[in-house]
Image (spheres, helix red, strand yellow):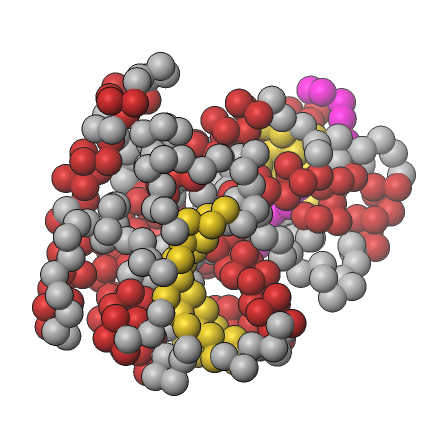
Amino acid sequence: MSRIVLTTIGSFGDLHPKIAIALELRRRGHHVVFVTHQEYQYKIESLGFEFHRMRPDNTALTDPQEMSRMMDLRTGTEYVVRNWVCASLRETYTDLINTAQNADLIINGEGVLAARLVAEKLEIPWVLTVLQPLAFLSAYDPSVLPALPAIFQLPGLNVIAQRGIRPLSKFLSKAWAEPVYQLRREIGLPSLKGNPLIDDKYSPGLVLAMFSPVFAAPQPDWPTNTVLTGFTFYDGSEGGRQLPTELDQFLDAGEPPIVFTLGSAAVVSPGQFYEESINAVSRLDRRAVLLMGKNALPADLPKNIIAVNYTPYSQLFSRACAIVHQGGVGTTAQALRAGRPTLVTPYSVDQPDNAARVERLGTS
């Protein structure tokens, strides 16, 4: 039995695919240890996994202003990397290396930049997981990158032009990665050949592209050791969890509703999404389900609309007539799996690119 450290940061959209991996690894006899935000301790331990806290804490889950900064369409990625990931790099490294001393393997999400340092320092093999096609910045399968100049968003640019995106991204983010270079020097690791955020972030052993080949096919400029796994699914429904009685009765009482959701990150700072959704449903004279997280439920909702905190997408989406969502890759995967039409209203990061891919698939 191997001891496998699985580490990730971010929202439930980042955590849930790792839980899916962990459940399968445990089924095969391995001991999985989670190292992640303290906010996820109860969820992880309730599933029977060993948990260790890793900084930074994910305070944005309850701080709309912080989440708004992280989700800013133009500056959100830089803010997350510089003010959250790299600002806490030493703490992340310390927490992770203390847990990984006796590990046989580390599996990490992209945001855990310390995972590679720990793996190299302890001479442990590591696996990088990638949740969305945007992460590869492929010249052969161009992605939507709102943070770059508008010229790079023009359709029809040839491969030669698209190849300029990766060098430009390296240049723009070079200063962001300075804490990584500095910490590598301090702990005696060799210098990197490239940028740990762009072209020198991939594991030499294995890269897992955790999305469907329908969503994005393998490309010539992906790392050669990349394995396309398909989407991995976990949403809490595996233990026999049922829909709330009130919601189940609502679904049975009429035509399939439109479901409105913002996943687990954008929902913290939703803007006018839910107000506009209610207005749209009223104009369309349709039934609707609003998944609102911890936001205050609207008062005096009409009988054709129900608002709930959360319910597993796998149990709800297949009973919808259409799904309106933020375009997070986990939500997108569940919507595609349900086979329902979707309308994506992207907020930030990979969501505009995911929206473009959904449109190209013809499911929007």
Can you tell which quarter of the image residue 20 is in? bottom right
Residue 162 coordinates in the image, percent (x, y): 28, 25
Q: Is residue 35 visible?
A: no
Q: Is residue 165 left or right of residue 251?
A: left
Q: Can see residue 211?
A: yes
Q: Residue furthest top?
A: 156
Q: Is residue 258 magenta?
A: no
Q: What residue is drawn where x is 39% and y is 38%? A: 134
Q: Residue at x 40, y 70 (%)?
A: 106
Please say if 356 is above or below 289.
Answer: above
Percent of width and height locating residue 233? 62, 53
Of 352 and 188, nearer the camera is 188
- Which quadrant is the C terminus positioned in? top right
In the image, residue 139 above or below residue 298: above
User: The N terminus lies in which quarter of the figure?
Assistant: bottom right
Count of all numbered marks drawn on residues in the image: 0
Height in image: 203 above or below 6? above
Q: Position of residue 120 (x, y in %)?
A: 25, 71
Residue drawn at the location 58% of the way across and 52% of the way down = 232
Residue ID at (79%, 58%): 242
What span is in magenta?
283-295
- Residue at the far bottom in the pictured view: 102
Q: Residue 313's x, y, as percent?
A: 68, 48
Judged left or right of residue 31, residue 342 is: right
- Pick out the residue farthest to the right: 253
Q: Nearer the viewer, residue 85 or 105?
A: 105
**Which of the 4 quarters of the picture holds residue 237?**
bottom right
